[in-house]
Amino acid sequence: MEYMNVTYGFASTMTAKPGRGDELIELLRLGLAEGRPATSEHCLVYLFSRSASNPDVAHVIEGWTSEEDHRRVFAGEAAQAIVARFADLLAEEPEYTDLTPVGGKAVV
């Protein structure tokens, strides 16, 4: 098995409008559908979770082969269609933390 290295990543926190947390999770799940961003060979980690204390808050961790690959994939039509749907759903701008991966693992 050939392993690819994650050289670019980020964590984000997204807050849905009150009562719309389920919709937020479903939209994040769409990222895993065939032809969507998380199925790209360059997306090596895509993990989303819900806050235990606030069901309208979701956290996302992504790991990519490079920042350039991430930018290229997200410039595509499939990714932009998902991104556009976040505008009506979110109560505020997502918070992002950039990451430089140095170790760990993600198992599919």
Image (spheres, rainbow, N blue to C red):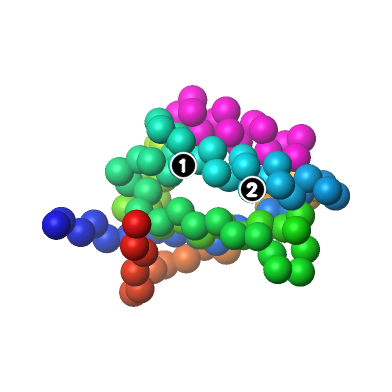
Q: Is residue 32 above or below residue 4?
A: above
Q: Is residue 102 magenta-colored?
A: no
Q: Is residue 95 above or below residue 100?
A: above
For this orientation, the residue located farthest to the top is 77
Residue under pointer 2: 25
Q: Secondary structure at mark 2?
A: helix
Q: Earlier in the sequence, mark 1 or mark 2?
A: 2
Residue 32 marker = 1
For the residues labelled 1 and 2, say whether their Cβ atoms are less than 8 Å apart.
no
> Which residue is at a point 60% across and 36% down the rendered structure image?
83
> Which residue is at a point 38% across and 41% down the rendered structure image?
39
Magenta residue span: 75-89
Number of residues whose C-alpha sits closer than 10 Å to that of mark 2, classed few (under 14), some (14–19) or many (20 or more): some
Q: What amino acid is at disc 2?
A: Ile
Image quadrant holding the C terminus, namely: bottom left
Q: Compare residues 32 and 101 and report the one nearer the observer.
A: 32
For this orientation, the residue located farthest to the left is 1
